[in-house]
Amino acid sequence: MATPVPPSAPIAESKKYFVLGSSTLAFTVCFTIWMMFGVVGIPIKTALQLNETQFGLLTAMPVLTGSLVRVPLGIWTDRFGGRIVFFILMLATVIPIYLISYATEYWHFLVLGLFVGLAGGSFSVGTPYVARWFKPERKGLAMGVFGAGNSGAAVNKFVAPVIIASAGWMMVPKVYAALMLGTAILFWIFSASDPSHQVASKESLGQQLAMLKDSRVLRYCQYYSVVFGGYVGLSLWMVKYYVTEYGLDMKQAALLAACFSLPGGVLRALGGWLSDRYGAYKVTWWVMWVCWVAFFLLSYPQTDFTIITVKGPQTFHIGIGVEAFTALMFTVGIAMAVGKASVFKFISDEYSSNIGAVSGIVGLAGGLGGFILPIIFGAALDLTGVRSSCFMLLYGTVCVSLVGMHYQFRRESMLSAQAALAKA
């Protein structure tokens, strides 16, 4: 039997870039569709007369599935290879996406949303699949390029409102189903597989979940639930916020909401570079401070108050205009993009031997944060009637992160110093 001839260096070099390009395209499309209810949910809310909590649950259902399948998909990617797992994952969502256009009851959308949410698990497939094609010194850039697929949240805001305006919301699932099918075919044509990349997973699902006993892992779960969970939750919530708070039409609202989603997706590579240069702790610390200031300003509701002066009553208005609001959201988007990378830099520094297990758990926590937040946003709005209550909640979560970082790292620094003195 003839020995197979290994591919030449130029062919092997080009193959990995085809893998990176096709995987990034597939992840972008998957993320676009994963976020679809952030726009499509607005006319559905009107048609079904949903309250804010029900709307939050509707938008969050795909996020739930996309989060829960991340760990098993990572294990299957190790075992069977990323190409086949990614391809099957995309094909499995096509029919549920298409059926959304024929849904008529609230529970129909919830159930179909769970199946559509499988697309959100694409990150845990594409990350190890792409990483294994690149040498260690180039993995960071490759991961940054692939991670830019998060910008699919912005793509959804550009595409869906145009389709809704021209053909109604029911056309969006049909177009997205065709887009997913076409992308799956293109991915299969241009991607490649390498049998040497298939390895038996070192950790079982139970062993991965056991990582939650480590206080450091819990800490990174909390950070990531802020920077990634907050990013997903706000991406789903912002279009409706612009429509209801500032009275914009859906096209204008989606365009301005993309000012948050786009940098929050494409600038992840910047966060990796900053973390390499200045350290994950400093970068994450400043990310949290930027978010803390921005959320404090965004939390202030539109307010009118009257004071009695010598000339009689005078009424004043305090509130953030749409321009200032968009600028603050743009800043938050950049901060969250940087923070998503810095958290994983923490993990790569402290868990180099089992980064896959820890990153799977942290990613799951971030995804669950993105599921819970829209529901809480809706419940808070129903209870208080204050639209900026969503930012008040995020302000509180950032406060928890800052306080935890201060005391935990201060304690660890003191212990390290004591250990160094004991050795001296």
Image (cartoon, rainbow, N blue to C red):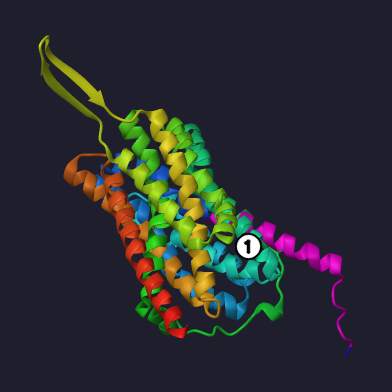
Q: Is residue 13 magenta?
A: yes
Above or below: residue 252 compared with residue 214: above
Q: Is residue 302 above or below residue 22?
A: above
Magenta span: chief secondary structure:
helix
Foreground residue, 284 or 126? 284
Q: What residue type is labelled 1?
A: Gly
> Picture quarter containing residue 1?
bottom right
- Could you tell me residue 80's position as x and y percent? 61, 78
Quickly name the residue at label 1: 140
Image x and y of residue 169, in percent: 43, 40
Q: Is residue 369 visible?
A: yes
Residue 4 lies in what quarter of the image?
bottom right
Which residue corresponds to the image point at 51% horizontal and 76% vertical from the top-left?
A: 351
Q: What stretch is highlighted in magenta?
A: 2-30
User: What residue sits 49% from the left and 77% below the top?
Assistant: 357
Label 1, residues with CA under 10 Å away: few <14, some 14-19, many ≥20: some
Whether residue 186 is visible to the viewer of this picture, yes or no, is no
What is the x, y in percent for residue 318?
A: 26, 27
Closer-to-camera residue (309/269): 309
Q: Residue at x 87, y 71 (%)?
A: 8
Image-quadrant location for residue 304:
top left
